[in-house]
């Protein structure tokens, strides 16, 4: 995939370091699940899911003894094994067809209790084709603002991005109302 960062981005590391206690985290569309292994190593309860059997198989192989952190599952029907504090977003929304974006926003709001957060990377550039399907900043706000308040929004520098998102990726933290 052109959006596989092959590691754990600095913005996520800084987010985790800023937290006073481990946060139970769900990673939808986890791909290779690098972040899941790293979060688990930090003592964070984590579950990573992907709809693709191939992605899940590759992630489990990569994770080795931590393979149980990854499930093959449909995000829109998945029930996590714990109450979620954080949903980590990295190239999941932009991998979905635009026709599923409203469903994504509803599902994220359903999964997160009040005060919990949607944190991660958002591809803020409209694109005519995809995936990845970029989204304009005002469209993302319209999608999430009913249920979330954006608390953090800053551009991601090139060193923490992947070429397909360069110059248009933002680290954002949205708190559930």
Image (spheres, helix red, strand yellow):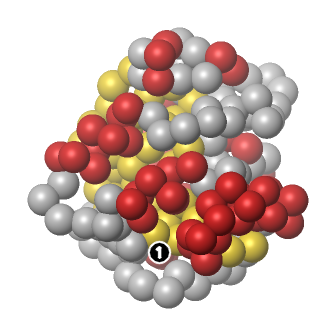
Which residue, given by chain and number where applicable, does mark 1 sit on? 111
Residue 149: percent from the left, percent from the top? 29, 50
Q: Residue at x 39, y 49 (%)?
A: 119
Q: Residue at x 28, y 72 (%)?
A: 114
Q: Residue at x 27, y 38 (%)?
A: 14
Secondary element type, mark 1 = helix
- Residue 136 at least partly seen: no
Specify whether 177 is left or right of 33: left
Binning the other alpha carbons within 10 Å of mark 1 as few (below 14), some (14 to 19) or many (20 upward) gives many
Residue 20: percent from the left, percent from the top? 12, 59
Residue 108: percent from the left, percent from the top? 50, 65
- Residue 73 at least partly seen: yes
Q: Is residue 37 above or below residue 138?
A: below
Residue 132: percent from the left, percent from the top? 74, 33
Location of the N terminus (image quadrant) = top right
Nearer to me, 86 or 176: 86
Q: Is residue 117 above or below residue 163?
A: below
Q: Residue at x 69, y 32 (%)?
A: 3
């Amino acid at each position: 995939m052109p959006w596989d960062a092959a590691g754990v981005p600095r913005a996520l590391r800084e987010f985790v370091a800023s937290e006073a206690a481990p946060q139970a985290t769900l990673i939808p569309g986890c791909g290779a699940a690098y972040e899941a292994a790293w979060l688990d190593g930090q003592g964070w309860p984590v579950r990573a899911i992907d709809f693709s059997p191939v992605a899940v198989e590759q992630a489990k192989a990569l994770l080795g003894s931590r393979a149980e952190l990854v499930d093959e599952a449909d995000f829109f029907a998945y029930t996590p094994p714990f109450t979620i504090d954080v949903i980590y977003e990295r190239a999941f929304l932009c991998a979905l067809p635009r026709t599923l974006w409203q469903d994504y926003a509803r599902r994220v709001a359903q999964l997160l209790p009040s005060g919990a957060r949607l944190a991660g990377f958002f591809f803020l550039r409209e694109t005519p084709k995809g995936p990845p399907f970029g989204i304009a900043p005002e469209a993302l706000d319209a999608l999430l603002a009913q249920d979330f308040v954006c608390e953090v929004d800053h551009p991601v520098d090139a060193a923490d991005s992947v070429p397909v998102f360069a110059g248009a990726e933002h680290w954002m933290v949205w708190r559930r109302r």
